[in-house]
Amino acid sequence: MAIDTTNMCSQLQKKLFEEDGIYHRLWIAMQDDPELTAVVRSRQLHIYRNGKKVLVLAGKAEPKIIREDSLCEMI
């Protein structure tokens, strides 16, 4: 999965892409799941499964669970 990180919050980038980041295992799981897509909006990462939003990750704020999903259980 490739996402445009140009407008992503730098703190979120660290949490997501660095191996010791709290969201790194979510990023790894997202790579292996073809049903998931992600888009950066307002410096946050919006994650979708089959076109329906399931989770919003932000740099400083708590993750916002939109729908129950196996990915949300990993937080």
Image: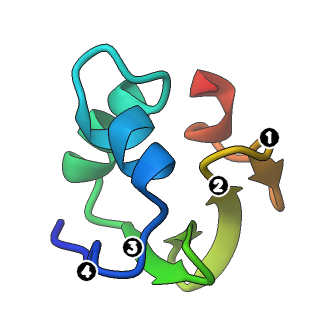
Q: Earlier in the sequence, mark 1 or mark 4?
A: 4
- The outermost residue toward the top is 20
Name the residue rendered at 33%, 49% in the picture: 30
- The label nearer to you, 3 versus 4, is 4
Q: Are marks 1 and 3 in contact (CB under 8 Å)?
A: no
Q: Distance between the residues labelled 3 and 4?
A: 12 Å
Q: Check disc 4 and report the residue beneath it.
A: 4
Q: Check disc 1 and report the residue beneath it.
A: 62
Tell me if 28 is positioned left or right of 40 in this view: left
The residue type indicated by label 3 comes to Thr
Q: Distance between the residues labelled 2 and 3?
A: 16 Å
Name the residue rendered at 41%, 54% in the picture: 10
Q: Distance between the residues labelled 1 and 4?
A: 22 Å
Of residues 14 and 50, the one nearer the viewer is: 14
Q: Do the residues labelled 2 and 1 touch (CB within 8 Å)?
A: yes
Q: Check disc 3 and report the residue beneath it.
A: 37
Q: Check disc 2 and report the residue beneath it.
A: 58
Image-quadrant location for residue 15: top left
The location of residue 57, given as percent across then percent down, is 62, 54
Name the residue rendered at 81%, 52% in the picture: 64
Density class for disc 1 (Cα within 10 Å; few <14, some 14-19, many ≥20) is few
Name the residue rendered at 28%, 80% in the picture: 6
Q: Earlier in the sequence, mark 2 or mark 4?
A: 4
Say which element carries label 1.
loop
